[in-house]
Amino acid sequence: MKRKCLWGAIAALFLLFNSGSNYAVTVYFPETDISGGAGAGIMASAQAEITSGAGYLDIVLTNTSPLGPVLANPDRRANPFIMEIEVVFAGGFTLNASSSYVSSFANTWFAQGKTKNTMNPAVQLGILNLDYNLVAPDSPGMDTCYMTADADNVSNNNTIGSINVLDGEYRPQEYYAEGFLNPSPDVDSGAIFDSALFHFAFNETATPGASFYLMPDTLYIKYIGGGDYSMHVANVPEPSSVALLGLGTLALLRKRKR
């Protein structure tokens, strides 16, 4: 009986830390009010799909926020945008900054600013390097931060917006922070919708465990939207991952009792 429990624990932990050939996990950033108690009800949410391989860690970050509320008049909404990602690296890994990057996907939509009275529709520009910089994190315990080079109400470089912000003609329904949608200084800047790939390359050839990010406070993102509203939020494991972790823990506890 002890042997069966031991193998049950090993099997559960094997599934947890080796789920799929690409070692992928998904974590969620639950819906959060980023309006800072101002009563605007600007809700933000996201998810991250994390895949690791020999010497790299890929994080596909998707903004899943709902369309923001109408503010002041029907032409003014405030929507959450993601401007940075902060991570903790598993022990024994050092970042290779020159081989790390942030990119769009073939089906990424790029905001194209506005005319005098109307938002221009977003367009698809294909796979492009996005304008993010590796900088020191401002959250305790984080190892590094990828942050947009510029994000304000005047200009912007590739903050991540939700696809829910685009209407049926792919026009952004956002007038409160128009700079986030500004393609200046070139067509590759402005907000993108709705995912970006953050590729972290390491000097080591070992495979970092994606399941490391099932632990809380190993991955932060920062939302900004509706002017000065902003908030850091931490990762939360998907329910199935939590259940699997519990299964492994329960099996180990049963083994110990016997």
Image (cartoon, rainbow, N blue to C red):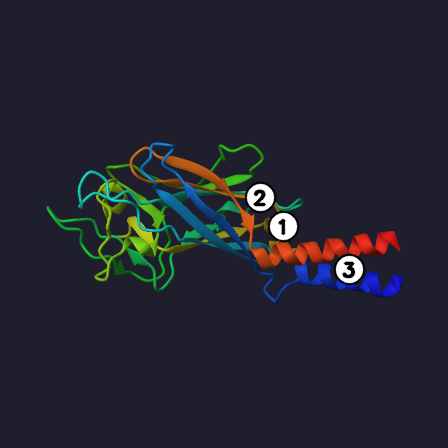
> Mark 2 sits on what residue?
218
Element under label 3?
A: helix
Q: Residue at x 50, y 35 (%)?
A: 137
Horizontal and vertical percent position of residue 163: 33, 56
Q: How many numbered circles are shown?
A: 3
Of callouts 3 and 2, which one flags the residue occurring earlier in the amino acid sequence? 3
Instruction: Tell me the kind of residue under disc 1.
Output: Phe
> Mark 3 sits on what residue?
9
Q: Residue at x 26, y 52 (%)?
A: 111
- Judged left or right of residue 165, residue 223 is right
- Mark 3 touching mark 2, by CB under 8 A? no
> Mark 1 sits on what residue?
212
Task: Count neighbours of disc 2 (C-alpha within 10 A) and say few if under 14, some if 14 to 19, many if 20 or more.
Answer: some
Q: Residue at x 38, y 33 (%)?
A: 36
- Mark 2 touching mark 1, by CB under 8 A? yes
Q: As displayed, is residue 210 above or below residue 19?
A: above
